[in-house]
Amino acid sequence: MNKTELAQAILDASHRPDLSSFTDTFIRRAEGMIRRDIRAYPLAVTLVEADRVANGLYNLPDGFLEARRVRIGDNALESVSLAILRVLSGSADPFWYAVLGDTIEFRGIPGTNATIDLDYLGSPPVLSVGADTNALLTEHESLYVEGALFHLYRHTQDRELAADAFNAFSDVMEPLNQQFGRRVGGASVAGAYNLYGNGGGF
């Protein structure tokens, strides 16, 4: 499923084709719910030369939250503080790394065209255009559909249907978080979406 197909699924489920101009908004708000609640979504990427900012500094992928494992070839690197990292000479073999905001720095400095395998916890990529998709949407489309329906029914001020959609969203999200938590060895996950706190009720 891609974003265009998701938008159609939302309209079909709600029987509200007249709200087609609002589907981008409903999807964006559903993505906000998903990003708030999923904190144990395992992903993997290979960092390459194009990701290098300078020397041992590389850009991290969008949605990165926490590194789980970093490898260059068969060598697993160790996470350290920035102060410790820079004790090691840049000319040494890569051994340590430190995460700095949206970048990751290595010591020693990886060679030109080195490939770095990064397993991490993150958020699924944002759906920006009609052809966009991601693994979470492919595997659990109901999470996006029910989250979007929750906001659609808030828009139409139908509290009962909004509550039903929210419950359906939670019924998918909670076991998914538990499953992801077990997969990553007990990683902590976010609490349930707060329907009423901070002015968030409908």
Image (tube, helix red, strand yellow):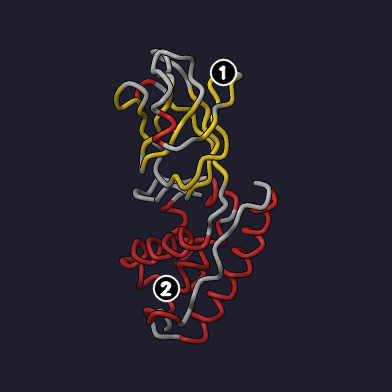
Q: What element carries label 2?
A: helix
Residues packed near mark 1 inside 10 Å, few (<14), some (14 to 19) or many (20 plus): few
Give how far across and how far down residue 59 sits, in percent.
Answer: 36, 33
Residue depicted at x 40% and y 13%: 91
Above or below residue 199? Residue 49 is above
Dot 1 amino acid type: Gly
Q: Which residue occupies 54% across, 75% down?
A: 165
Q: Residue 183: horizontal and vertical position, in percent?
A: 68, 47
Tell whether 169 sits left or right of 150: right
Name the element at disc 1. Answer: loop
Distance CA(mark 1)–CA(mark 2): 46 Å
Q: How crowded is mark 2: few (under 14 residues within 10 Å), some or many (20 or more)?
A: many
Report which quarter residue 22 is drawn in.
Answer: bottom left
Residue type, numbered disc 2: His
Whether residue 145 is situated above or below residue 184 in the rendered picture: below
Foreground tag (1 vs 2): 1
Q: In which quarter of the image is the C terminus?
A: bottom left
Foreground of the two, 53 or 13: 53
Q: Mark 1 points at which residue?
A: 73
* Camera-nearest residue between 116 and 88: 88
Identify the residue position indicated by label 2 in the image.
151
- Which residue shows up at 42% across the image and 23% down it? 48
Q: Is the residue under label 2 in contact with that under label 1 (CB below 8 Å)? A: no
Relative height, residue 193 to residue 93 (above, below)? below
Instruction: Looking at the image, tell me whether mark 1 or mark 2 is earlier in sequence order.
Output: 1
The image quarter containing residue 70 is top right
Considering only vertical position in the picture, is 97 above or below 133? above
